[in-house]
Image (spheres, helix red, strand yellow):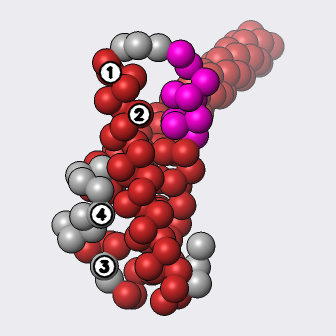
Amino acid sequence: MFNTFVSLEKGVDGLFGSFARLDSRISSVGHTAAKIGDHLQSADTQRESASQTIELIKYLMEFNRSAGDLTQLSPLFIDDNRVAEAASIAQKLRSFADEDIGRQKTTVSSAVGNATSHIGLEVAITNLQEYCNGTTANYLFL
């Protein structure tokens, strides 16, 4: 009977060891899953940021078509129900364009790309200013 008791005790010790290893492995897998989740969340945040940047660039290109031509703007800038959203985007576009013009003026370069970019953003700034002035007169949002 003593041998049976010793045998059972060894079996229980082995079982506790197995549970401890299983618990450790589950903890390790959980930690790895949390890391993967963090990476996926970070990637999603970067994807969302890139998507918003692409959208802003599309809007900037609309304002960059030709000086004084606001006839072919996205419905966002025409819809009276989306004035707040349009104002927010227009302000972001103006800030970006003004910032880029400021960088261009401080950089002395004869590169054609810089000159073209500089002139193009001036058109966008002019059109954005005209858009904002016209909308501000009606809604006072900027």
Q: Position of residue 95 (x, y in %)?
A: 56, 50
Q: Does residue 14 appear in this view? A: yes
Q: Sequence order check: which comes first, mark 2 or mark 3?
A: 3
Q: Sequence order check: which comes first, mark 1 or mark 2?
A: 1
Q: Secondary structure at mark 4?
A: loop
Residue type, mark 2 in image: His
Q: Sequence order check: which comes first, mark 4 or mark 2?
A: 4
- Residue in view at x 29 percent, y 56 percent: 67
Label 4, label 2: how far apart the Cα atoms are: 17 Å
Eye-nearest disc, 2 or 3:
2
Label 3, label 1: how far apart the Cα atoms are: 32 Å
Is residue 92 located in the magenta-colored stretch of the structure?
no
Q: Which residue is mark 1?
A: 113
Q: Secondary structure at mark 1?
A: helix
Q: Magenta-highlighted stretch: main secondary structure?
A: helix
Q: Which residue is mark 4?
A: 68
Contact between marks 3 and 4 (CB within 8 A): the answer is no
Label 3, label 4: how far apart the Cα atoms are: 16 Å
Q: Is residue 60 left or right of residue 6?
A: left
Q: Which label number is shown at residue 78?
A: 3
Q: Residue furthest right?
A: 2
Q: Which residue is mark 2?
A: 118
- Residue in view at x 56 percent, y 19 percent: 107
Q: Is residue 25 left or right of residue 59?
A: right
Is residue 103 located in the magenta-colored stretch of the structure?
yes
Eye-nearest disc, 3 or 4:
4
- The answer to which of 90 and 65 lies nearer the viewer is 65
Q: Sequence order check: which comes first, mark 4 or mark 1?
A: 4
Quadrant placement of the N terminus: top right
